[in-house]
Image (cartoon, coloured by chain):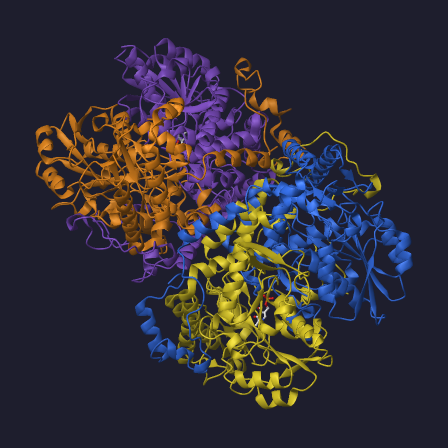
Chain colours: A purple, B orange, C blue, D yellow
């Protein structure tokens, strides 16, 4: 492991060519406003910086270097051409508050992406401003709230979520001031319809759902669910994290959803940057259009213009200082244009083909799918319950051991309701050979679990660090160099 | 098939393994009547070459503008090394570092970032990023609310000298909860918060005071006095600052006798391009007693099985994927790559370089101010110390002047008209270290000629319809 | 100090270790009177930001030209992935792979390149690059000379249908040795080598025949007949080809009954930008019996101590650092990074993609030819099959027409006037897959209007002084 | 190690988004001109290509990732800003045969670089066209030949080179039709003056020299050498590979050299690309100006223009199809502007400081310098003769073992006259700490050589491959996949 950059620091060093020339002019700021001592930033030369961070980067798995079957995350190829074009100086140097006449290039892209997202979702209105899925969820649930409010339907205080839902769903509902109520899943991975029926009522503001669900199966009774929620006066929210599974095949709007977000960094292949940025546009049916967050691009006599609070008096408001992650919007737009309508459909087809192929191979190799009778969507779950019991090798151990095989681990222990689970999503951009290599690795690890379980339990062995002590990290909080914080 | 590797033979073999007759069958659990019937209303695919021509033309449309707009997004020189390294596939195409052992690069970098940002703010801890400056402020307010359990109703003092868009975002985000926002007016002469007004507005239920530095008008607030006042009133002080300015100005952790409790703001000035408004990132730092309220990801240093140093995401119990409805925030995907760029940027500049960027920006802004104020009818509005931005009043309608400038690819500043009608025809102007004397001369000359032209109104009205931004 | 990390303290400590009083003392072995006395006549240092402004302005001057020039350098779409990956520090900032174990990345890539290029040429082996197409041809000629020891005097048949600059380079490089170059005229009707003429010129001492495909005029030579003729005369045949065209056209290894012996050319069309002429790279392939004559680096596959596959520079005994004055060439630094880009380019396109690029270029060129030949007075000169370039004769002076086009940012082609005065006012025009119907329409419209304007001569003469390139 | 890309190939695959759209037009080429079967290129998808080559890159040492003290190669930091600006589309899309009026931006840079190179070399004329050091040497020696020829001095058939010279020197002289005569080095690393005196005569065309020499010491009698060669009627060639040592301190023109090349990829920090490209401009004194290779940029009434054969009738001619490695010229120009005049001098100072510091530390640690009494220039030699004899650990072994310490090996076994030598050049852009790490590593290896010599003899142990069999590679020539060539 490289040292910390602070350990390379020497007083007086910096990247000289980057420092502006000294101007012989006074600083017109009274002294009591000024900083007295320097912040603790590293003092290093340009080569040291480039070498340090280049070396750090090499201590990462990534799509560009490894297969990354991280369920629910759609880690597909991020086209380099898209990134390259988004870095054109005309885009990079453009100020967000430029007048419209100086912004038509960018606005054309944003406008067209709004139209494309309407087409793929079957919705009537789109706002691109949410900066990730969770913020899209926030916007969506806030719109549900605003909708009921506008109709003076003020007692709807509950949002329903399946027990399999992603953590952002309940967290969002809570952040919007709702009470969260969990709906159980039946043995086939579907929402338990009877429980749902029992749960809805005049207090129901809406339900958040993803379909296919995070269990990797398509919710077949989706129309029943929609009917139940709608009849109770609630609205249906579609968590678009799994849109990759159905792109061009079936549309949330057609399934009865009222509002949804789209994770551009998943389905639209924008790079995830080791944690972000993302993009979480929201799409809505007619009745929610007035509530969309602003700004929104409109086309008016051949010119693009921004619509904001003034033009959208019922909007839930603004979600970012400017207009969201514009560069991600640009990239998603370009990806959509590269794919075109045929390409969109192929995404779902091949994502599904890859997932079902993997599932079939793993089943044949003796792994246990969480839902044996179901078709996999673009992802699926295997449970290592038996293995954990028999050989005391957990899903975590298997995941860590996979890293030694130079493959990123699948999502572990999510959804929470399936014990010792791995959620596996290969995506459409991986080749059959890569999938075969993955299956081989898992078979090998299963074998190791039986024959040398310690090897698996103490994995990884080949990376820059062995298994890390998370408990110590949380107990002896060290989150800032040289400033160890006492346990709280 | 763009980006899909499957050969015809692959498809056959895979379908055979699945025991599916064809691709269609893979979707047999989807009710047939729900399936998309018509071809999607989306254009046909483009090749990368075709896309390149289209996008180059679009980029060209918005290119080569000379920019004196600031208002929350600042043009700074970004060393080429920043994005050359940040764009490496291993940083750019990685997911969140859930598997710590396979993500030490990102995790160590975030730990370094946290150290740098906390130190820049002179506070104890930093998280690994929020979406942007505005949402960081909203989250800071929510932190304050969570930290102050004694109040049932929470009132937040939110001065009007805070960026108007930030205030809007705060309202959108915390508006869903039982929190009241009190707008604090600014002193019309100084352009800053007046302690006297503050004292009037404050109440028992006041939970937090937001203190901008510099404020939206570029003016420096009397942060020491404000922080001290908050402390004595048991009000949590939330700084919202330009991080670059903190290399020159007194940082939040040193305001007043106790320092501000929380600091947040927009990270964009530290190595992130303007890029039509994003992706940027919000930073959020606080005193250590607030760390459990801090939303978002935090990286901690620990050891591996062999005692070797390593890094992990820590305090995850605060986060949505563990605590679900009780999480400190719903944020999941954050703005990691932007933080990567900023960390490289701060490393290149170091404390002295960063300070020099801040100083040069200030100096250029002062020069521009001097030059502009010599134009007949142009008036500098607030007579307080400024960082690199300030307000001028024009003798003609700002919208029309800006429009005329824009037609000549000159972006003269941000129109305050609709946000602060009480100020009259006011413009917020900014200069950073990127501006040369030649640029300043150009701007002054052009503005002089536009202001002295008699037929300004006629000309501009034709185009007036398009002269707005997304306010 | 840009790029120098030393702090003041470092310097002191280091001088102390050296036992030197100051920096000056480090140069005490240099006679004092030889030392530079005056400050160097070089401008003061610029910051990266300042340099950026200067270079952006300069790049802008030469930008946004629509290009129909070919003549040895061709504009093709380069997938972004090519240079995004080739520019990675580990490829770009490595030296020659002298330490094989620490350079397996570069070495494996070169092995893959050799395989691709040899296969594209349908020959047995390829080296790892020459400087450019022209020097590759010169080295190919020297290979032929070395391979043919029976002749004392060597005569090389070098057709005038070979790129004139290549012919000049060959003369510069081999002109230092005892080799005679025989220019072979081209048939004025077909634009290609005539077998009859060849037979006349050939002599006992003829060592090699150079065969271009397509030739400089874009015309396809009758390569089978030429190669067969050379074979029967015991003359070594050297193909000089556009490698991209070889995805569509018959490759050198399959010419005639035996195939050409050596193939070389310019690698630029395979993923290398125009970039004012370089860096490009020359490729050089041959039949296996010539491998010991092949100059430059060659990578071989081998095994390590444990039998694991690995790659090394091989046959180094041919090279200057071992054989010194008896080396096959003096080349040392070659064009590795360009080969890296080309290898990525060929991998992305594959055999079918590459063929499609060649076909589309050909089709666009044919379309342009049709359209241009409808302009009054414009005449297509050679009636032979072409690849993506060909010669037209204009009714007005080419230099003046080009100048007028250039003023409107249209680059109409390459002026053949000074190189081939016998052809009259001729222009070599090219279209590749990058040209749209719209581009072609623009060119035709502009040329039509220029040719029909009556005051062409007057207007252009004013600027005539600058209307030349570096011929 | 990654597989070969050919092993990933599957029939029918390619990077679809990169292939031009099919146009419904005939191909107007008779069949007998066309290729019948496809070339053997890989058929792979875009992600596979990006992943394959990204992974390959990670199997390399480089300046961006490691210390690279490769003597004679000046592996210093390659500023990223320079690379970035050279990639501006206005530069990349510019055709070499554009008319001058469309080329002024590039030509301004080339012209100014010519002027800068004159200033740092103390010469009167410069041509930028040679594409690397060796081609610069070729141009230089060809000019020497042309000079004598123009004076009808036709019997000068010999070029002298010191025995320490780089292989390109004799190879170049031979390629220019000269007979090469080696001059021995004295015990202090200088050219043996008596031998030189004995060697010169009416047959002497010139002498090739680098100063400081490849032995890492400054040739103090350089003026005597110049006088001897000049008196014999020969010209003196300066091999600029070591210019980094003297930049701004002493100039070849002032030392009496008539002609020289400059390796832009060394002294001017252009990236070496894993083998190239480089740049090898030639600079000459007055009398050789007429012979410079073309084209050359001139300034004429405010506009830049090319001078070529027509304006330079005595030129040795053209050395490349266009004007050399233009992109490298651009980069070298930018580097020179970033450094400015003060920066130029610092290059020599700090390169020399670093070398002498390393030398002092290594001496103190018990290593044997080749020239004990001499000041190091920007590089120096240690000889492991004793170690080789005592512990049977060679310079090669030590070099390979250094790789395990994550440091690139110095140049080995060059110059040829020093046994078991390592030629060490740290360059000015490395920090003191890095140098200390290097010294520590060498001390450690020396210790290993004594205590566990096999560890050193079989190094490297930590890279993707162990020591490679070069003999097998040359004997069983395998230079093209699936086409093993029989031993010849
Ligand atoms: C099912 C699901 N919903 C929501 C989210 C949250 O999206 P984001 O990370 O973009 O905020 C995720 C992200 O992993 C997810 O997988
Ligand atoms: C001393 C010396 N001379 C000449 C050369 C040849 O230069 P190039 O590799 O640029 O052709 C080198 C390169 O290593 C060298 O070190």
Left-right relation of D314 to C88: right
In the picture shown, does residue A337 fall above or below D370?
A: above
Quadrant for the C terminus of chain A, please. Answer: top left
Answer with the quadrant where ligand 1 appears in the image.
Answer: top left
Residue name at image x 70 percent, y 39 percent = C361
Occupied quadrant, residue D275: bottom right
Q: Nearer the viewer, residue B247 or B386?
A: B386
Left-right relation of D367 to D166: left
Give the image location of residue A294, x and y in percent.
Answer: 35, 24
Residue name at image x 67 percent, y 42 percent = C457
In the picture shown, does residue D368 fall above or below B398?
A: below
Residue name at image x 69 percent, y 37 percent = C451
Give the image location of residue C326, x and y in percent.
Answer: 71, 74
Q: Nearer the viewer, residue C334 or D487?
A: C334
Left-right relation of C456 to A462: right
Query: Which residue extends farthest top?
Result: A231
Occupied quadrant, residue C293: bottom right
Q: Nearer the viewer, residue C37 or D268?
A: C37
Give the image location of residue D333, x and y in percent.
Answer: 50, 59
Residue name at image x 32 percent, y 59 percent = A7
């Amino acid at each position: 492991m490289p040292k910390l950059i602070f350990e390379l620091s020497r007083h007086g060093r910096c990247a000289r060519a980057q420092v502006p020339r000294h101007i012989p002019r006074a600083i017109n700021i009274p002294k009591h406003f000024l900083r007295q001592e320097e912040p603790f930033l590293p003092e290093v030369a340009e080569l040291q910086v480039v070498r340090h961070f280049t070396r750090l980067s090499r201590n990462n798995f990534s799509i560009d270097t490894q297969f990354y079957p991280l369920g629910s995350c759609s880690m597909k190829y991020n086209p380099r051409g898209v990134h390259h074009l988004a870095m054109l100086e005309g885009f990079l140097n453009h100020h967000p508050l430029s007048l419209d006449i100086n912004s038509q290039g960018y606005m054309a892209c944003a406008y067209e992406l709004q139209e494309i997202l309407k087409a793929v979702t079957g919705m009537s209105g789109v706002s691109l401003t949410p900066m990730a899925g969770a913020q899209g969820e926030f916007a969506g649930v806030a719109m549900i709230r605003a909708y009921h409010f506008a109709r003076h339907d003020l007692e709807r205080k509950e949002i329903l979520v399946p027990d399999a839902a992603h953590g952002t769903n309940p967290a969002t509902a809570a952040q919007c001031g709702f009470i969260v109520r969990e709906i159980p899943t039946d043995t086939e991975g579907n929402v338990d319809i009877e429980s749902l029926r029992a749960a809805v009522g005049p207090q129901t503001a809406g339900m958040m759902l993803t379909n296919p669900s995070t269990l990797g199966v398509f919710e077949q009774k989706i129309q029943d669910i929609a009917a139940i929620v709608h009849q109770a006066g609630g609205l249906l929210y579609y968590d678009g994290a799994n849109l990759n599974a159905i792109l061009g095949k079936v549309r949330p709007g057609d399934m009865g959803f009222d509002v949804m977000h789209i994770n551009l960094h998943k389905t639209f292949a924008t790079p995830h940057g080791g944690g972000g940025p993302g993009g979480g546009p929201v799409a809505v049916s007619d009745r929610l259009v007035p509530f969309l967050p602003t700004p929104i691009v409109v086309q008016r006599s051949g010119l693009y213009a921004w619509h904001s609070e003034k033009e959208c008096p019922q909007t839930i408001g603004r979600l970012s200082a400017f207009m969201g992650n514009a560069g991600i919007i640009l990239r998603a737009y370009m990806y959509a244009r590269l794919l075109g309508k045929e390409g969109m459909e192929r995404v779902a087809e091949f994502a599904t083909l890859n997932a079902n192929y993997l599932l079939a191979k793993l089943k044949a190799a003796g792994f246990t799918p969480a839902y044996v009778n179901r078709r996999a969507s673009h992802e699926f779950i295997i449970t290592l319950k038996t293995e954990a019991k028999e050989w005391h090798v957990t899903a975590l151990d298997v995941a860590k051991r996979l890293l030694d095989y130079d493959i990123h681990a699948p999502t572990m222990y999510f959804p929470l309701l399936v014990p010792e689970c791995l959620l596996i999503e290969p995506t459409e951009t991986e080749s059959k050979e890569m999938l075969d290599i993955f299956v081989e690795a898992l078979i090998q690890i299963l074998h190791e679990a039986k024959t040398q379980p310690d090897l698996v339990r103490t994995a990884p062995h080949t990376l820059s660090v062995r298994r890390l002590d998370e408990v110590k990290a949380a107990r002896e909080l060290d989150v800032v160099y040289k400033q160890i914080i006492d346990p709280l | 098939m763009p980006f899909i590797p499957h050969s015809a033979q692959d498809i056959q073999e895979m379908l055979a393994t699945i025991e599916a007759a064809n691709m269609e069958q893979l979707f047999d659990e989807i009710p047939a009547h729900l399936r998309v019937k018509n071809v999607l209303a989306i254009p046909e695919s483009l090749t990368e070459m075709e896309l390149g021509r289209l996008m180059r033309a679009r980029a060209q449309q918005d290119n080569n503008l000379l920019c004196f707009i600031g208002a929350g997004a600042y043009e700074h020189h970004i060393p080429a090394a920043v994005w050359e390294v940040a764009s490496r596939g291993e940083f750019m195409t990685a997911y969140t570092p859930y598997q710590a052992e396979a993500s030490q690069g990102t995790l160590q970098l975030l730990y370094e970032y946290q150290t740098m940002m906390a130190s820049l703010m002179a506070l104890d801890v930093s998280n690994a990023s929020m979406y942007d400056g505005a949402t960081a402020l909203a989250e800071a307010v929510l932190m304050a609310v969570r930290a102050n359990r004694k109040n049932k109703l929470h009132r937040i003092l939110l001065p009007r000298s805070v960026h108007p868009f930030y205030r809007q975002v705060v309202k959108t985000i915390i508006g869903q909860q039982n929190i009241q926002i009190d707008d604090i007016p600014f002193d019309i002469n100084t352009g800053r918060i007046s302690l006297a007004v503050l004292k009037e507005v404050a109440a028992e239920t006041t939970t937090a005071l937001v203190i901008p530095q510099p404020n939206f008008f570029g003016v420096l607030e009397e942060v020491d006095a404000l922080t001290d006042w908050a402390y004595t009133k048991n009000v949590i002080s939330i700084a919202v600052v330009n991080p670059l300015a903190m290399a020159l100005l007194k940082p939040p952790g040193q305001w007043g006798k106790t320092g501000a409790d929380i600091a947040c703001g927009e990270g964009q000035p530290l190595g992130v391009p303007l890029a039509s408004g994003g992706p940027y990132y919000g930073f959020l730092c606080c005193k250590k007693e607030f760390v459990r309220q801090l939303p978002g990801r935090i990286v901690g240093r620990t050891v591996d099985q062999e005692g070797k140093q390593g890094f992990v995401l820590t305090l995850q119990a605060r986060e949505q994927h563990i605590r679900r409805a009780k999480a400190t925030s719903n944020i999941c995907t954050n703005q990691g790559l932007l933080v990567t760029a900023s960390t490289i940027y701060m490393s290149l500049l170091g404390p002295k370089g960063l300070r020099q960027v801040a100083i040069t920006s200030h100096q250029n802004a002062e020069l521009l101010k001097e030059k502009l104020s010599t134009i007949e009818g142009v008036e500098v509005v607030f007579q307080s110390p400024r960082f690199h931005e300030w307000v001028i009043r024009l003798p003609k309608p700002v919208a029309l002047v800006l429009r005329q400038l824009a037609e000549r690819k000159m972006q003269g500043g941000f129109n305050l008209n609709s946000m602060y009608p009480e100020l009259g025809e006011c413009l917020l102007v900014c200069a950073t270290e990127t501006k040369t004397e030649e640029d300043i001369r150009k701007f002054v000359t052009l503005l002089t000629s536009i202001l002295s032209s008699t037929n300004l109104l006629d000309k501009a009205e034709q185009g007036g319809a398009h002269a707005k931004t997304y306010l």
